[in-house]
Amino acid sequence: MNTSTPRPCNGTYTVGDFDFTLPPELIAQHPAAERSASRLLDGRGRTPVDRAFRDLPALLQPGDLLVFNDTKVIKARLLGEKPTGGAVEALVERVLPGEGIHEVWAHLRASKSPRPGTLVRFADAFDAEVLARVGPEDALFHLRFPADPLVLLERHGHVPLPPYITHADTAEDVARYQTVFAARPGAVAAPTAALHFDEALLTALAARGVQRTAVTLHVGAGTFQPVRVDNIAEHRMHSEWFEVGNDTAAAIAATQAAGGRVVAVGTTTLRALESAALRTPEGSPLAPFSGETDIFITPGFDFRVVDLLLTNFHLPRSTLMMLVSAFAGHAHIRALYRHAVESRYRFFSYGDAMLLQR
């Protein structure tokens, strides 16, 4: 339930309106022992209710539609060195399409940025050629690999854990920083709300009469980038590739026609659905779409598809704090986060979740 009237993003909000104090010990460094054993903060009403994530089937209705993001996290982090011996760390942002081209865009961290034509040796196993600087403000490097990047990353890369997780990736992270239904490789960050689902919970949801479908949005490293302007209307989002297919569009249309609710599992799913809606004529059923989105959802946004949102807790002053505030109400989200901190919920990617209503 909204407890505040959303204001349009016209300069009335500043980044400080989405700040909160988080004790560092509440940042989850490891996943719960079982996926569905995480806690779930039911934030649909005025008063928050503490639940377990495996309670979810009882909170949904037969005929509701769960929409997942079926992207698969790739082992996008590579360690290497320049010909001079200087260390290089790469985070592959995007594997470029095209059979046989073997090219990627990546963030590179080095004492001195390598110039075009430089060969960087990764994992003491293969050389990648730096082709050019690309992207906004030339923040990315265009690299050519000697073979299929997905194969090389799987063999030599590391799980791209978020910057607030302080340990090196382990076998646990390979298994748990990935959803059980991940299908389409391309993400460099997990759609974390979906990490709570296991096969037993999916079976229970199906028995409840809850339907499921999927979109794809390949989450980029920009999801962790801070908002560097005070007036949030001046912030520009990174671009990510997404797809809402024919079957998913049809499932959503059928759900809405029957009076069911569309439940987005995670902010990435919500961004994909609402991005497709922006490309659909007003009043028409959601149209399939495949392409890029840099949608920035802030208070005042007109949601057209999603009725309920499952989401983890987000970084202070982040675009995702702005998104959930737009969805459920700024004052309501602030109250939920105060309750979560006081009740010692676990935060961020390996943390707990909450259920919100538009």
Image (cartoon, rainbow, N blue to C red):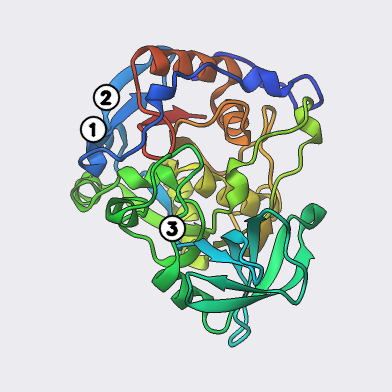
In this orientation, which residue lies closer to the viewer: 358 or 353? 353
Instruction: Say what secondary structure mark 2 lies in.
Output: strand
Q: Residue at x 43, y 40 (%)?
A: 261
Crowd around label 2: few <14 · some 14–19 · many ≥20 (10 Å): some
- Residue 288: tell me if it is visible: no
> For the residue marked with disc 2, what is the amino acid?
Arg
Q: Residue at x 63, y 35 (%)?
A: 319
Crowd around label 3: few <14 · some 14–19 · many ≥20 (10 Å): many
Instruction: Say what secondary structure mark 1 lies in.
Output: helix
Are the residues tagged 1 and 3 within 8 Å (C-beta)? Answer: no
Instruction: Locate residue 166, reporting x and y percent.
Output: 43, 39
Earlier residue among tags 2 and 3: 2
| Mark 2, residue position | 51
| Mark 1, residue position | 55
**Image position of 313 with respect to 195: above or below:** above
> For the residue marked with disc 3, what is the amino acid?
Ala
